[in-house]
Image: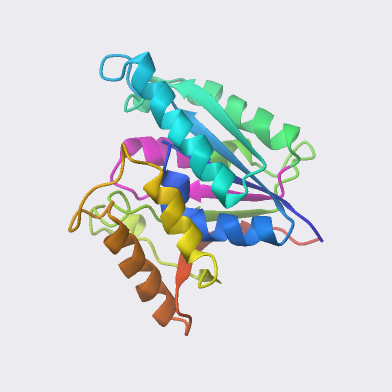
Amino acid sequence: MKKNILILAPHPDDEVLGCGGFIKKKSQQGHRVYVLVATRGSAKRYSEERVANVRREALDAHALLGVSETVFLDFPAPDLDLVSKADMSGEIAHVLKKFEIEELFLPHRGDIHHDHQAVFNAGLVAARPVHGNTVKRIYAYETLSETEWAAPFAADVFIPNYFEEVSDTFAAKLEAMKLFKSQLREFPNSRSLQAIEALAKFRGCTVGFDRAEAFMVIRVIES
C-alpha cells in the first residue's frame, strides 16, 4: 500500500542529513514523499539572493531523491522562539491535511538548535490525533551537527529504536548532499560527506546492515 510521507525540516538540508537514504528508498518503492522546510533564514543575516540559492539547492537535491513536492514556509531562523507556536503549528497542519500525510518525520526534540526543538513541538501539535487527522505514525530523525551536540541529559538523548537500511540508496544521499554546496563542510566537520558516511555505517552495523538511518518512534496508531 502506497503511503504519503512528510519530512519536516527546520532548515534546508536537515531532511537530507537525517532522511536522505530513506527518502530515496521510499520514492523508489512508489510512496509519495513530501518535504516541508519551516524557515527561510534570518532577515538580518540572509539576503533574498542567499535564501533563493539555498532553496534552489534543496529543490535540486529533492529532485534527485524523488521528492514529490517541496513546500517552503517563511518563518525566521534562528528566531523561532519569537514566533507564534499556534501560527507555525497551523501552517504545518495545513500541509498535513493537503497531502493527507500518514507518516510524519520530525527533527529530534533534544537537538542543540532551538529551532529544531520548536519545529518538533509544532509538528507534534499539528499531528494531534483529533478531528480526523490522517497522521498515524510519527518518528524523529537525527541531524549531524545538531543532535550529537545536545546536552547529556536523559530527556535530550537520541535513542534510536527504528532503523531503515539504506545500503542501496546511500550513494544518492551523498549526491544529494553534494548539491548543498552552501551547507557542506570539510571533514572533520560533522556536515561533511565523510561524517555522513561514518554515521550511516555505525547505524548500519548496530543492526547488521551495511548502512542505515536511525529514528525514534514517537507514536504509532494502528486501526
Colour convention: rainbow
Magenta highlight on residue 160: no
Between 25 and 77, the residue placed more toward the observer is 25
Q: Is residue 166 above or below residue 187?
A: below
Residue 178: image location, x then y, percent: 38, 49
Residue at 46% across / 50% down in the picture? 176
Q: Quadrant of residue 71?
A: top right
Q: Is residue 106 above or below residue 55?
A: below
Residue at 51% across / 39% down in the picture? 60
Between 30 and 148, the residue placed more toward the observer is 30
Residue 121: image location, x then y, percent: 48, 39
Magenta highlight on residue 112: yes
Residue segment shown in magenta: 101-122
Residue 108, visible in the rendered structure? no
Q: Is residue 213 above or below residue 201?
A: above
Determine the residue located farthest toward the left in the rendered image.
188
Residue at 40% across / 66% down in the picture? 159
Split into 4 quadrants, where in the image is the N terminus?
bottom right
Q: How many marks?
A: 0
| For residue 93, side relative to residue 178 (left or right) | right
